[in-house]
């Protein structure tokens, strides 16, 4: 089962991708996570991406397309995968189609998480991630038992550099300009399944399961 999770920053793509991964045993492929790991390691890819990411801008298409092309060929993608945060522009969506044709795969569903823009800023500013295991928390909606400490592994919880309010506004503008047109793009291909991403994470996940298991359109 090959899925794309589409939606603005803060819509809950990462959280839902992890829940889908646990249930269906297919890997989550997050270009944001791959890029953040490269920045942390200080690789040339990381250095190239960092200036864009810190400003809340998109990393150039050719960089992320190359990453995805390589990642989708790995053997753990044989039974399916969840693309989280890719594609984000029309050229990326077109490149993805070409990659699929090359590796003889196709897309099953594009799940669009639809959330009120004002809600997104509230969600993003409260987000905290574990430095050690990547566990995700939220100071309002999913607080850790002990402030600043991961419940899973005891690691330190941090705010992503690009989750500060000014950068968030830029990321939301980038989304509207570059990524939102993909909703229509996938609608035209009859692949789009829109889900209201406003409720609790379990409620949203139930709707995703319904789409995936029952092929509700
Ligand atoms: P995310 O964790 O998905 O919100 O991504 C964080 C940042 O990584 C974005 O604001 C972009 O700078 C960069 N990024 C992630 N995925 C892509 C993509 N598909 N195209 C361009 N830039 C991306």
Image (tube, rainbow, N blue to C red):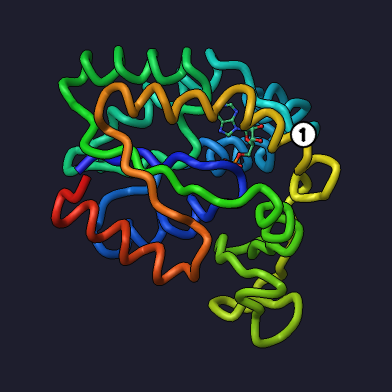
Question: Ligand 1: which quarter?
Answer: top right
Residue 171, picture quadrant = top right
> Label 1 belongs to which residue?
170
110 or 18, nearer to the observer: 110
Q: Is residue 60 left or right of residue 156?
A: left
Residue 124, picture quadrant = bottom right
3 or 103, nearer to the observer: 3
Label 1 residue SS:
helix
Q: Residue at x 57, y 60 (%)?
A: 134
Q: Is residue 113 left or right of residue 81?
A: right
Residue 58 appears at what percent x and percent y? 65, 26
Relative vertical location of residue 116 with respect to residue 84 in this rendering, above or below:
below
Q: Residue at x 27, y 32 (%)?
A: 191
User: Which quadrant holds the C terminus?
Assistant: top left
User: Which quadrant holds the N terminus?
Assistant: top left
53 or 87, nearer to the observer: 87
Q: Residue at x 24, y 53 (%)?
A: 211
Q: Is residue 162 left or right of residue 94?
A: right
- Outermost residue toward the bottom in this view: 145
């Amino acid at each position: 089962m090959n899925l794309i999770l589409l939606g603005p920053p803060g819509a809950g793509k990462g959280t839902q991708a992890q829940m889908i991964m646990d249930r269906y045993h297919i890997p989550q492929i997050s270009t944001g996570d791959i890029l953040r790991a490269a920045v942390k390691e200080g690789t040339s890819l990381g250095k190239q991406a960092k200036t864009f990411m810190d400003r809340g801008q998109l990393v150039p298409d050719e960089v992320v397309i190359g990453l995805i092309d390589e990642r989708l060929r790995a053997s753990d993608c044989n039974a399916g995968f969840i693309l989280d945060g890719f594609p984000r522009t029309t050229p990326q969506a077109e490149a993805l189609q070409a990659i699929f044709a090359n590796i003889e795969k196709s897309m099953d569903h594009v799940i669009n998480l639809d959330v009120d823009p004002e809600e997104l800023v509230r969600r993003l500013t409260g987000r905290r991630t574990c430095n050690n295991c990547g566990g995700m928390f939220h100071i309002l909606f999913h607080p850790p038992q002990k402030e600043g400490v991961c419940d899973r592994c005891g690691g330190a919880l941090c705010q992503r550099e690009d989750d500060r309010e000014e950068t968030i506004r830029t990321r939301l503008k980038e989304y509207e300009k570059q990524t939102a047109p993909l909703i229509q793009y996938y609608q035209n291909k009859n692949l789009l399944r829109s889900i209201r991403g406003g409720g609790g994470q379990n409620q949203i996940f139930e709707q995703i399961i319904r789409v995936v298991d029952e092929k509700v359109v």
